[in-house]
Amino acid sequence: MDISKYSIERYIIVLDEGTASAKAIIFDKRGETKTVAQYELSQYYPYPEWVEQDAEENMDLSDESGQRGYRDRKICAKNLAVLGNCMEPSKQS
């Protein structure tokens, strides 16, 4: 793999998996947003007031959003200094 086209600066990537989308945000060392990649998550309604999601799809889209984020900006994955993951806990009644 030719890495000469990739930046050598260090970055922070944060994965945010919410109830409706999987998003990756990459920041530079100054805290400025370099890129955002986001995918909508499928939601299924088997019963009234009941929503379900596919866990494998959620993980796949989280992974893809992160990869798309650094590929789009030509950032080498080894230059990602921190990986954070934010997930909203499910609400149970």
Image: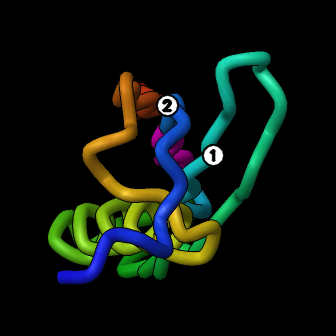
For this orientation, the residue located farthest to the front is 4
Q: Which label number is shown at residue 10?
A: 2
The colour mode here is rainbow
Q: Quadrant of the N terminus?
A: bottom left
Q: Is residue 91 visible?
A: no
In magenta stretch: residue 17: yes
Q: Nearer the viewer, residue 23 or 43?
A: 23
Give the residue type at disc 2.
Answer: Arg
* Above or below: residue 65 compared with residue 91: below
For marks 1 and 2, give the CA distance. Answer: 14 Å
Q: Quadrant of residue 30?
A: top right
Residue 44's label in the rendered image is: none
Query: Picture coordinates of residue 47 (x, y %)?
Result: 41, 74
- What residue sits right under mark 1 in the picture? 25
Q: Residue at x 42, y 80 (%)?
A: 44
Q: Nearer the viewer, residue 7 or 90?
A: 7
Q: Which residues are magenta?
A: 14-19
Magenta stretch, main secondary structure, is: strand
Q: Is residue 81 left or right of residue 33?
A: left
- Give the mark nearer the N terminus: 1 vs 2: 2
**Taking 87 as reference, is 48 above or below it?**
below
Q: Is residue 64 magenta?
A: no
User: Which amino acid type is marked by label 1?
Assistant: Ile
